[in-house]
Amino acid sequence: MKLIKTFQRAAVLGAAIITAGFLTTAAMAQDISESHLAAAKKVAVATKVLEPFDDILPILAEQTRTAFIQSDPTRAEEIIEITQDVALKLAPRRSELNNLVYNTWAQSFSEAELNQLADFYNTELGQKLTSTIPAITQFSVGAAREWQDKISTEMVTMVQEELAKKNDAQ
């Protein structure tokens, strides 16, 4: 029962956040023409920015399924079936997220800029950039963590040395 109350609270909070986002987006999107949104969609498709979101619904379904099965393992088969059905019912709502992304692009760039970006990202170089950015980002994040660890160690050592010097001087 506690699990269900937690899900209900999460659902209410989630609905409130989503509603606020839609209202904000709707208010901002009023000035955006259909051709401007179409240009934003071309860029989003060309850059594949929506692909990372493909896993949201399957992950949510798995988390929901797991939580309910942990709460009532005797109904596991029923929970699996119902969760799958609900996930399939929610799948068409993915377009809501896509539209939010298109609006974000449209609010960030003029229609002409979006058309230029779409043209670039549809070139061979643009496609290469799109396909290599995830690997470059992953490497960069790893390199930043390594560098941070190295600098952190050096900083601690240097501070210890300086504190020791101050102690020796006193």
Image: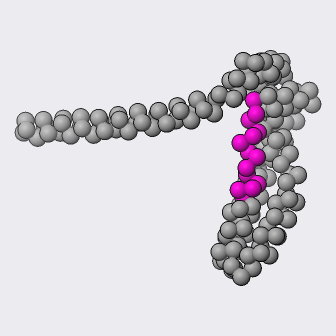
Q: Main secondary structure of the magenta part?
A: helix
Could you tell me if residue 94 is visible in this image? Answer: yes
Which quadrant of the view contains residue 155?
A: top left
Could you tell me if residue 5 is visible in this image? Answer: no
For image coordinates 38% across by 39% down, the residue present is: 149
Task: Check if residue 146 falls in the magenta segment.
Answer: no
Q: In the drawing, does residue 139 fall left or right of residue 50?
A: left
Percent coordinates x, y for residue 33 in the rendering: 91, 29
In the rendered view, would you say 145 is above or below 123?
Answer: below
Percent coordinates x, y for residue 79 in the rendering: 77, 73
In the rendered view, would you say 5 is above or below 41?
Answer: below
For image coordinates 81% across by 32% down, the residue present is: 45
Q: In the drawing, does residue 103 fall left or right of residue 130?
A: right
Percent coordinates x, y for residue 156 in the rendering: 27, 40
Residue closest to the eye, 136 or 164: 136
For image coordinates 79% across by 28% down, the residue present is: 46
Q: Which residue is outermost to the right?
A: 34
Residue closest to the eye, 76 or 102: 76
* Image quarter of the C terminus: top left
Percent coordinates x, y for residue 162 in the rendering: 18, 35
> What is the total number of numbered labels drawn onto the structure image?
0
Task: Check if residue 57 falls in the magenta segment.
Answer: yes
User: Start and end of the magenta stretch?
Assistant: 47-60
Which quadrant of the view contains residue 150?
A: top left
For image coordinates 80% across by 45% down, the residue present is: 97
Which quadrant of the view contains residue 127?
A: top right
Q: In the drawing, does residue 5 fall left or right of residue 93?
A: left
In the rendered view, would you say 72 is above or below 82?
Answer: below
In the rendered view, would you say 63 is above or below 99?
Answer: below
* Image quarter of the N terminus: bottom right
Residue closest to the eye, 163 or 78: 78
